[in-house]
Amino acid sequence: MKKGKFRATARGANYAAFICAVNNAGIALYKLKRDGCELSFVCDIGCEAHVARIAARHGMLFRVCVRKNEKTSLRAFLKHTGAWTALACVVISFAVSRFFVFSVAVEGVSPSRAAEIYSAISEAGIDGVTAKSAIDLQKVEELVAGSSDDIAFAEAYIDGIRLVVNVREQIPQPVAEESDGEIVSSSDAIVTRVEVSGGTAVVKEGDTVRKGQTLIEDYILVGDPLDPEHKEIETAAEGDVYGRVWYVQRLNVPTVVEKTVRTGRKYSSSELLFNDKVLLPAKSDHGFGEWELECLSKPLGSVLPLSLNTYTWYETVTERVEVDEAYLEGEIYAAFSSLFASLDPSATVLTSYKSQKKVDNYYIIILYYEVEQLIGCREA
């Protein structure tokens, strides 16, 4: 006999006789309800055919609405349980990934150097699962850049559940102590031109140099340098050395910013002045919690030095709004202007470009100016 239940209806005038006949047949009806001449009930699924015959004998219109056996019920339960479990896992994973970092990725260096940087970051307390709110990206960059003298640049940002640290190493070059007779580089650069009028150049076009590295030595070679008998005559180092130099600025722009907007309410009041002395002061009974103030000054005549100052208070509120492209472009323009103002006076701009990346709830924007400038000189 099949196990399970079915829900059905029986419609007709002999509903009372139908109920008695079903009971006399030993069939149990559950959740029995009557609405006029229509009965609705639940019954064991194995009794369906018998109940149908009894309904036909009493002139009742019998109709099965739902059948549900135990196997189907169990499968449906398991199906829904699995779906809810999967949904719960997705929600929990999203919430955890929204607020926590699970791993650290170091890019741009060899595996052995990456292991050293991992160790430095771990000592700073960023190891394993770490709350994003507890990570100061600027301090991470300073920590990594300061962990070794040969690291030129470190960029840290959060990408999903990872803390990514992009590292650029210095190109090892011999660094000489600056002396009165030598010309040394004023910044890290790639040499583009060497113009020597005194001394001996120790760099050539295309060489990478670091700040403080010697460019022109204070001597002149006489003879073949490979000949043990060659001589070095001491002389003043003179000339100009140019190089390609990069100026870099980084912006962290949040995706949501606070913006002050006017509500439309305003309050105006005027004051009367005689020769810049207040005769009738203005009132400021606006009662606004936040406001912007504008002042309009107007002379009242050419004979007497009377003037009228009208003050207008505009009520404002602070709203959190998502930044758009226009806002980002404004921030980038202002940063580019500031970076341009910091260029060396001798610099000739070769190119400028930007790198933009959106991670979590802010934008990382890095601006570059590539210039050619004088990196070492001494006049004769």
Image (cartoon, rainbow, N blue to C red):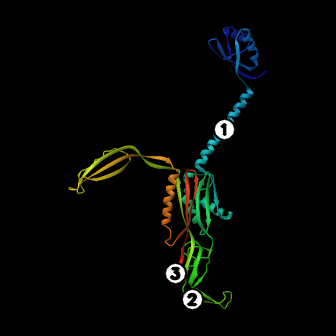
Q: Position of residue 352 (x, y in %)?
A: 55, 64
Quarter containing the N terminus:
top right
Mark 3 closeness class: few <14, some 14–19, many ≥20 residues within 10 Å: some
**Above or below, 81 relative to 129:** above
- Check disc 1 and report the residue beneath it: 85
Q: Position of residue 257 (x, y in %)?
A: 49, 50
Q: Residue furthest bottom?
A: 229
Which is nearer the N-term, disc 1 or disc 3?
1
Q: Is residue 125 visible?
A: no
Q: Please state which amino acid type lies under the numbered disc 2.
A: Glu
Check contact, mark 2 vs mark 1: CB within 8 A. Answer: no
Q: CA distance from mark 1 to mark 3?
A: 75 Å
Q: How many marks?
A: 3
Between 93 and 166, which is closer to the camera in this rendering? 166
Between 46 and 54, which is closer to the camera in this rendering? 54
State which quadrant residue 264 falls in. Answer: top left
Q: Residue furthest front?
A: 302
Front disc: 2 or 3: 3
Taking the spot 59% from the left edge, 74% from the top edge, the residue there is: 192
Q: Please state which amino acid type lies under the numbered disc 3.
A: Arg
Q: CA distance from mark 2 to mark 1?
A: 83 Å
- Check disc 3 and report the residue beneath it: 378
Which is nearer the N-term, disc 2 or disc 1?
1
- Check disc 2 and report the residue beneath it: 234
Between 118 and 198, which is closer to the camera in this rendering? 198
Check contact, mark 1 vs mark 3: CB within 8 A. Answer: no
